């Protein structure tokens, strides 16, 4: 394809390093689609007559059919672009040589990859929404279940199980929002940029944009051919998504352990041990954590590669695809498994209830003292003393003898007398976004809507 200038073909060692077909074969459908759009634009510009354009369209369709059927699995072509062109020669003969008029693989690959991203974003968004919906369903069912809320791994205040689950659902709303935003910038058309300086053929780039469903046309050909910001951005969005799945995973690995026992994973979404018959392993969540680390590696490699490059195309950019595909594959294989595990896990409210310690109400004691006019800082100190004395005596807060409580503060016996249940404590946190029933129900309502449809409406491009 570029052999004219060289006396000998590339060495085997160079081909082994340089050839990318094993990775970019996945772009075949986008390459055919973009090539067909290019045929239309060449015809519109008067470079091809209608008969030639018709033959090229038919030939490209047949090439697409062959590739979709798995043809040329062992092909030794340099990349998907050269493979498609070689097959087009087989279909339409020398006319195939006219397809590449005014086009470069530099604007071609950038166009193909952007199309691939646009195609992948829809199914990805659906999977995120489905996981979000699964968390919301579990949350609805768990609104009456109380457990300790933890900070620093320490019991802090009682909360609703629903509230904990929703704390993992809201990040998914942000992920969808972020991906919709990335989509806007993915949808800029590079085709018509040539190798770096624009195309020698006066193609109508707005026509190309409309045929291929892009939102806008790139503004500078040198930038457009070397720009992989969209890959880096998508990798970042995927890294944060993977991070959210990983954090959910960490929480559920802990909660499904024998020691906590707050949830039981279903048989279909836990694995056994080859040696230890009693094990129910949360592999789904452990793998979700590992995929997050790996996806972060993809992002770091991508940005590390980009930072070294001048404007325009350098071959370094060929490495973008294996990183992006790796991260997208990880997301698409992890999301359904995490969703299945969430959908089928069984909360065990008795276990949650049984580990609630009365000291979780220490903040309520302080709040009540504040109600009696004690400044909060002082109230905090008094409640702390109460906890310490009860601990020293080995009794619960309420069991502390009245005279000892009175020594700490005169109203403390009264306050302890009217100290409510864990449920009362949960209901005290009435601010929006808190763990009270009303707030959790409001969140459930918003999230049910948010995960019910496309986000935002498909209008992004
Ligand atoms: N396989 C190449 C890639 O993925 C296509 C672009 C090649 N461009 C070039 N000037 N050699 O980046």
Image (cartoon, helix red, strand yellow):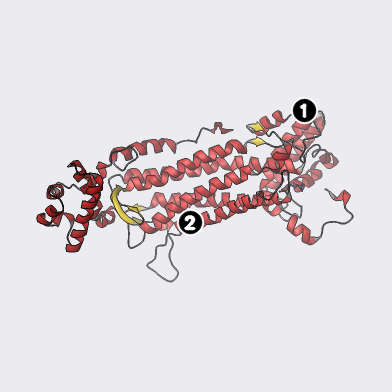
- 440 relative position to 82: left or right: left
| Residue in the image at 28% along x and 40% along y | 437
Quadrant in the rendering for residue 448: top left
User: Mark 1 Cα within 10 Å, few/some/many (few <14, many 20+)?
Assistant: some
| Residue in the image at 69% along x and 38% along y | 33
Residue position marked by numbered label 2 in the rendering: 289
| Residue in the image at 14% along x and 46% along y | 418
Residue sitting nearer the eye, 409 or 320: 409
- 394 relative position to 127: left or right: left
Residue sitting nearer the eye, 331 or 294: 294
- Secondary structure state at the residue bearing disc 1: helix
Q: In the displayed image of the protein, which residue is found farthest to the left? A: 403
- Secondary structure state at the residue bearing disc 2: helix
Is residue 34 depicted above or below 252 in this figure?
above
Is residue 20 depicted above or below 199 in this figure?
below
- Please provide percent x and percent y for residue 183: 58, 38
Image quarter of the C terminus: top right
Q: Distance between the residues labelled 2 and 1?
A: 51 Å
Instruction: Please tell me whether mark 2 or mark 1 is closer to you in this view.
Output: 2
Residue position marked by numbered label 1 in the rendering: 44
Residue sitting nearer the eye, 175 or 48: 175
Q: Identify the mark nearer the N-term, 2 or 1.
A: 1
| Residue in the image at 51% along x and 32% along y | 457
Q: In the displayed image of the protein, which residue is found farthest to the bottom? A: 275
- Please provide percent x and percent y for residue 81: 74, 46
User: Mark 2 Cα within 10 Å, few/some/many (few <14, many 20+)?
Assistant: many
Residue 61 showing in the rendered view: no
């Amino acid at each position: 394809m570029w052999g004219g200038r060289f006396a000998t073909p590339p060495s085997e060692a160079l081909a082994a390093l340089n050839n990318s077909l094993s990775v970019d074969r996945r772009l075949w459908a986008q390459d055919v689609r973009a090539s067909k759009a290019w045929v239309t634009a060449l015809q519109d510009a008067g470079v091809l007559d209608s008969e030639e354009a018709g033959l090229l369209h038919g030939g490209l369709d047949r090439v697409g059919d062959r590739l979709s059927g798995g043809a040329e699995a062992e092909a030794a072509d340099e990349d998907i672009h050269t493979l498609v062109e070689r097959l087009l020669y087989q279909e339409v003969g020398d006319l195939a040589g006219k397809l590449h008029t005014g086009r470069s693989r530099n604007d071609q690959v950038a166009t193909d990859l952007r199309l691939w991203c646009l195609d992948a974003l829809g199914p990805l968004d659906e999977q995120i929404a489905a996981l979000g919906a699964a968390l919301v369903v579990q949350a609805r069912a768990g609104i009456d279940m109380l457990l300790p809320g933890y900070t620093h791994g320490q019991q802090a205040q009682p909360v609703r199980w629903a509230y904990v689950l929703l704390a993992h659902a809201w990040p998914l709303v942000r992920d969808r929002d972020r991906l919709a935003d990335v989509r806007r910038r993915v949808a800029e058309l590079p085709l018509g940029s040539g190798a770096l300086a624009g195309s020698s053929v006066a193609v109508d780039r707005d026509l190309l944009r409309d045929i291929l469903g892009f939102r806008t046309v790139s503004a500078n050909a040198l930038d457009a051919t070397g720009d992989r910001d969209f890959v880096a951005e998508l990798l970042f969005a995927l890294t944060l998504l993977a991070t959210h799945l990983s954090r959910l995973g960490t929480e559920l690995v802990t909660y499904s352990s024998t020691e906590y026992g707050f949830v039981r994973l279903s048989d279909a979404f836990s694995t056994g041990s080859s040696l230890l018959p009693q094990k129910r392993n949360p592999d789904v969540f452990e793998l979700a954590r590992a995929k997050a680390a790996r996806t972060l590696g993809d992002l770091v490699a991508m940005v590390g590669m980009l930072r070294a490059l001048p404007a325009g195309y350098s071959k370094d950019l060929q490495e973008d695809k294996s990183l992006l595909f790796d991260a997208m594959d990880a997301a698409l294989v992890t999301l359904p498994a995490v969703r299945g595990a969430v959908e089928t896990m069984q909360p065990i409210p008795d276990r949650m209830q049984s580990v609630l310690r009365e000291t979780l109400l220490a903040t309520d004691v302080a709040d009540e003292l504040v109600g009696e006019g004690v400044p909060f800082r002082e109230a905090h100190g008094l409640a702390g003393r109460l906890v310490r004395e009860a601990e020293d005596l080995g009794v619960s807060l309420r069991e502390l003898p009245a005279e000892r409580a009175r020594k700490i503060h005169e109203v403390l016996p009264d306050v302890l007398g009217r100290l409510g249940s864990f449920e009362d404590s949960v209901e005290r946190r009435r601010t929006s976004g808190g763990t009270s029933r009303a707030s959790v129900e409001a969140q459930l309502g918003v999230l049910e809507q948010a995960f019910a449809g496309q986000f935002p409406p498909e209008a992004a491009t």
